């Protein structure tokens, strides 16, 4: 068996119409993620998103590279706030790669899609600024300014999540996976 939270190198050979694994080796084991339940939840949240968005046997090099960099960062990070900003960055990358970017990055109303009442998120000024910096590829401003608290970042995540769910017909749910609504 292969560990889902490892970067693994596989060698295949083709026999008739089938691909058969001939060998595999672990390249990175992400022990920093595996030893922290919050990081595990973030990793599984990201995997659940990819599971819903990517098609089987589909290839998207950009998303793979961003996933690897995301896991590398998460493996060594000890800053919860920055980890949530990492999720925000990841969601924004998916939006761009899936071709559902906002036509006008300054028009936050485009993000307010039709959602169930319990999933609706109020976009206050802090959330709006976080999203504007994100869309301008200037997230460092938010990283360096502690006034953008985790709760604002969580709301921004939910806004992007709702946007993705609406446009790609998915059911991404951070509240369930990341924030304690998941029953074990």
Image (cartoon, grey):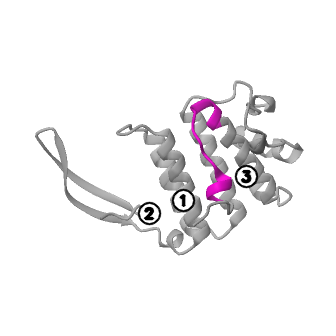
**What crowding class fits label 3: few (fewer than 14 Cα within 10 Å), some (14-19), or many (20 or more)?**
few
The residue stretch that appears in magenta: 164-178
- State how far apart marks 3 and 2 are (Cα): 28 Å
Instruction: Name the residue rendered at 53%, 68% in the picture.
Output: 33
Q: Is residue 181 visible?
A: yes
Q: Quadrant of residue 131?
A: top right
- State how far apart marks 1 and 2 are (Cα): 8 Å
Report if residue 181 lies within the magenta region.
no
Q: Quadrant of residue 40?
A: bottom right
Q: Are marks 1 and 2 in contact (CB under 8 Å)?
A: yes
Q: Main secondary structure of the magenta part?
A: helix
Q: Position of residue 74 (x, y in %)?
A: 57, 63
Q: Position of residue 119 (x, y in %)?
A: 74, 43
Disc ID at residue 140 = 3
Q: Position of residue 148 (x, y in %)?
A: 82, 55
Disc ID at residue 43 = 1
User: In the displayed structure, does residue 9 sit left or right of residue 23?
Assistant: right
Q: Which residue is mark 2?
A: 5
User: In the displayed structure, does residue 176 sit left or right of residue 159?
Assistant: left
- Indicate which disc, 3 or 2, sits on the residue closer to the N terminus: 2
Q: Position of residue 129 (x, y in %)?
A: 83, 43
Closer-to-camera residue (21/104): 21
Under circle 3, the secondary element is helix
């Amino acid at each position: 068996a292969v560990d889902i939270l490892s970067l693994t190198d596989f060698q295949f050979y083709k026999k008739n119409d089938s691909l058969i694994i001939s060998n595999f080796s672990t390249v990175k084991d992400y022990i920093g993620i595996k030893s922290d339940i919050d990081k595990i939840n973030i990793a599984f949240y990201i995997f659940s998103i990819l599971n819903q968005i990517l098609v089987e046997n589909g290839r998207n090099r950009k998303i793979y590279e961003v996933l690897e960099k995301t896991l590398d960062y998460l493996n060594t990070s000890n800053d919860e706030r920055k980890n949530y900003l990492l999720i925000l960055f990841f969601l924004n990358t998916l939006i761009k790669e899936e071709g559902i970017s906002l036509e006008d990055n300054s028009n936050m109303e485009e993000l307010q899609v039709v959602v169930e009442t319990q999933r609706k998120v109020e976009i206050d000024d802090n959330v709006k600024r976080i999203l504007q910096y994100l869309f301008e590829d200037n997230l460092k401003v938010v990283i360096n300014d502690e006034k953008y608290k985790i709760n604002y970042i969580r709301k921004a995540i939910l806004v992007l999540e709702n946007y993705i769910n609406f446009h790609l017909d998915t059911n991404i749910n951070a509240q369930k996976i990341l924030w304690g609504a998941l029953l074990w």
